[in-house]
Image (cartoon, grey):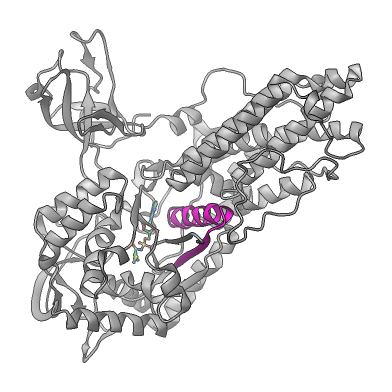
Amino acid sequence: MTQRFYVTTPIYYVNSSPHVGTAYTTVVADALARFHALRGERTFFLTGTDEHGLKLEREAQRKAMSPQAFVDEMSERFRDLWPKLLCRPDDFIRTTERRHEEGVQRAWQRCVDSGDIYLGSYEGLYCVACEDHKTEKELLEGNLCPVHGRPVERVTEQSYFFKLSAYGDRLLEFYKRNPTFVRPETRLNEVVSFVEGGLRDLSISRTSFSWGIPVPGDPKHVMYVWFDALFNYLTALAGTEREGALWPPDVQLVGKDILRFHAVYWPAFLMSAGYADDKLPRTIWSHGWLLTDGQKLSKSREGPSHGRGTTDPVRVADAVGADVLRYFLLREVSLGQDGEWSVPSLVSRARSDLAETVGNLLNRALPFAKHFDGRVPHAPAETLSDADRALEALAATAARDAAAAWAEPAPHRALEATIELARAGNRYFDESAPWRLAKAGDLARLAAVVSHVLELVRVVSVMLWPATPSKSDAIRAQLGLDPLAPRVDADLWPLAWGGLAAHTALAPGQPVFAKFDAQQQAQIFKELDVTTEETKPEAPAKAPKAAKPAEAKPAEAPPGPLTYEQLMATVDLRLAKVLAAERIPRKDKLLKLSVDLGEAAGPRTIIAGIALAYAPEALVGKQVIVVANLPPRDFGGGLVSHGMLLAAGPSDGLSLATFEKDHAPGTRVK
Ligand code: MSP
């Protein structure tokens, strides 16, 4: 049976233009859809815009426009952006479309029929930027919203309520039976504790403004924007063949700031509207944020990106190419973790992975085709060496690993495996020294080496395609291959060796990737407003030249001192405050800490091997330094650590690194 894959992004508020932070989710969704399409699945990728609510109404007023004219103009900016980033959504839904409004009204009616909607009166605090109610205890000092740092408003109004309180047990039961409903796992734990803390009924209508979907039968109320917006994932399919074929979504990507809406309200609304557990979304995938200088990158915090370059995705794509921007977002940020936005990091990533590893391998191999009439050489089995066979085996393993990582989804790991394979290809090229084989006239071995490198590049081009579709196709054009065109039920993932047939006419052309050398880097920095001192152009590692194979050298960058940019792009050190510490039964050396890194998602758990040197009570309130971008480490027995403390010394005389003065939790060490 045809497998299917339905992936969604949140629908974006149109109060401001998209930035690289919002582009991030869509790029991830597009890459996942492309991967699944390559595997022969029927894919459906939905995105769109969220156009109702007070925030939009006010923004339109500020611009002296009607709300409709304003959202029409702004929605267009999102719709137009995606093709520029090589994103190909199958549908783009707007919440002001009739199909959506009617669909949401039907859903509302179904919740009414279930007895879950009643009329009451609401008094409380509201953040207009979040379009969400806040409780006193969530607020920062000065009654500020913890997400936007803006004052909340006190509101009293008649309102329809949704009986969320009635869904606590059913939700907890559902999470237990579907432990991958929320991922990563740490986020599920947060959701479970939130629900266990008790759910209050949710105010789901407003009378204080009119820019929304009217409540059926009581049009002075408009629906709360989240009730309206969440149903987009359904209304985009409703009444079409797609609903039966594609529902429910397989992966719903959401930023960690909107996890609660998707992991608590959304399934509760669907349950109320009559959806059985097996018709609820399969996975809500909560990803981290792109940060600038440790802060969530957003329009409401617009300002200097600390010299690390513009956050306008179109300008970035124009300067470096959309493939490169996509590659950076997918490779640099581990899905689920935060990542720093930095044009200098993007350039160094593109240079080392794409130009000096993938592009270089192709450029080095192609000139040898002249010995074979410009075609892929034929290498009979008996001419193959152990090294050739080992390369084939390595490609098979890498293709399997990368496929598993994409399916996870863990794009950064999939791409890491892909580039690692290309690196191995460069090593194989160096060790096989085709220039010597050519000089010695050993055409049989030369044919084996060249055909192997070219096939390896083909394999890599497919594995890169979800991230860099147009560059992959450009590589394929030089290999004499057609662009990749996924078809339902045809698995194009390169699990088998030998897809590049002998005698295929090669078509060498301009290098597929820019070199990103010092001169190009300086130009890109200038175009993209990079101004920090520490990002002065550096001389890139000299890559072997493709045109003169006799001079070819190993392709890897020589070991050497790290640049500041590489350091910052690799290691994320944060100041943090220990909130609680406890011993762990039967683990003499370990302590379990709850540590505040100033993250909106709340404190992290860190397991540290410091119990012989520190009593738990001595640690509470202490400022520590945390390596914040390590993958979670599982110590067994339900103990998972989300970071590492810096320390030095023997285990019983260990001392923790700290700073002389106290700074805010989350401050980056630089
Ligand atoms: N309209 C709601 C979503 C409704 S879905 C039924 C919304 N819109 S948003 O435009 O504010 O955010 C959309 C998505 O973009 C969220 O998942 C949010 O986490 C993500 N991002 C916004 N800024 C981001 C970064 N700086 N980094 C990564 N993702 C970011 O919320």
Query: Residue 666: percent from the left, percent from the top?
Result: 27, 37
Query: Residue 538: percent from the left, percent from the top?
Result: 60, 29
Segment colored magenta: 19-47
Q: Is residue 22 magenta?
A: yes
Q: Of helix, strand and loop, which mostly describes the magenta segment?
A: helix
Q: Which residue occupies 11% across, 69% down?
A: 201
On screen, 506 above or below 660?
Answer: below
Q: Is residue 554 visible?
A: no
Q: Which residue occupies 72% across, 18% down?
A: 431
Query: Residue 233: percent from the left, percent from the top?
Result: 38, 69
Q: Quadrant of ligand 1?
A: bottom left
Decide if residue 529 is on the left or right side of residue 134.
Answer: right
Q: Is residue 209 magenta?
A: no
On screen, 366 above or below 320?
Answer: above
Q: Which residue occupies 55% across, 68% down?
A: 80
Q: Is residue 510 visible?
A: yes
